[in-house]
Image (spheres, helix red, strand yellow):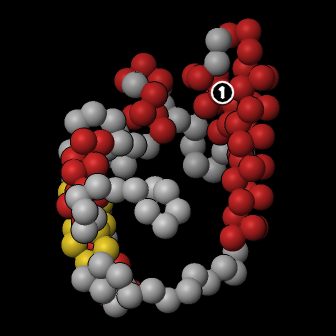
């Protein structure tokens, strides 16, 4: 997936049996200006450390049960997992598929479709992120 996101000139990725360090160096070589590969490697490692810290923080968290209607918004080019959510949630579950893939559907025009889907779920047709709103 990463080589496709980097473009056709990214070259073939390292073999999956390559070490994590080799794979990281391959990625950094394609993301960094030639003078800052070390800085890019350090930034990727820092972000991965944050990811691991978040994973430790939420592991074991069990959200309280809620009975609400749900809209599952997904990209047309990604797997539709609304049926899985429908089995897990007690309320009505509606699926909305928007243009794009997992990474691009929050760009235009998909993001407008996401906003429209959220507005349609709100009783007042306005989505409020304010507490109590």
Q: Give 17 or 75, whichever is nearer the viewer.
A: 75
x 26%, y 78%: residue: 93
x 42%, y 33%: residue: 5
Q: Give 118 or 34, whichever is nearer the viewer.
A: 118
Q: Does residue 72 appear left or right of residue 88 in this picture?
A: left
Residue 20 at x, y percent in the picture: 71, 45
- Dividing the picture into quarters, in which one does residue 29 lie? top right
- Furthest-top residue in this view: 35
Instruction: Note whether 8 is above or below 15 in the view shown.
Output: above
Quadrant in the picture for the C terminus = bottom left
x 70%, y 74%: residue: 59
The crowd level at tag 1 (other Cα within 10 Å; few <14, some 14-19, many 20+) is many
Q: Does residue 85 appear left or right of residue 43 in this picture?
A: left
Q: Does residue 12 appear left or right of residue 116 in this picture?
A: right
Quadrant in the picture for the N terminus = top left
Q: Give 35 or 122, whichever is nearer the viewer.
A: 122
Q: Does residue 128 appear left or right of residue 35 in this picture?
A: left
Residue 47 at x, y percent in the picture: 71, 42
x 56%, y 86%: residue: 64
- Dividing the picture into quarters, in which one does residue 90 lie? bottom left
Residue 95 at x, y percent in the picture: 22, 68
Q: Judge whether residue 77 can be spotted in this image.
A: no
Judging by the rendered image, the residue that carries numbered circle 1 is 28
Element assignment for label 1: helix
Q: Judge whether residue 94 can be spotted in this image.
A: yes
């Amino acid at each position: 997936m990463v080589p496709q996101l980097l473009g056709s000139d990214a070259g073939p990725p390292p073999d999956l049996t390559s070490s994590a360090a080799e794979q990281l160096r391959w990625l950094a070589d394609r993301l960094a200006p030639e003078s800052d590969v070390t800085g890019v490697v350090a930034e990727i490692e820092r972000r991965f450390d944050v990811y691991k810290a978040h994973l430790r923080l939420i592991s074991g968290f069990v959200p309280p049960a809620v009975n609400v209607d749900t809209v599952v918004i997904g990209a047309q080019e990604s797997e539709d997992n609304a049926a899985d959510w429908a089995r897990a949630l007690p309320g009505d579950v509606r699926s909305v598929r928007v243009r794009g893939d997992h990474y691009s559907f929050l760009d235009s025009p998909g993001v407008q479709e996401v906003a429209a889907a959220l507005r349609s779920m709100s009783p007042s047709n306005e989505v409020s992120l304010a507490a109590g709103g």
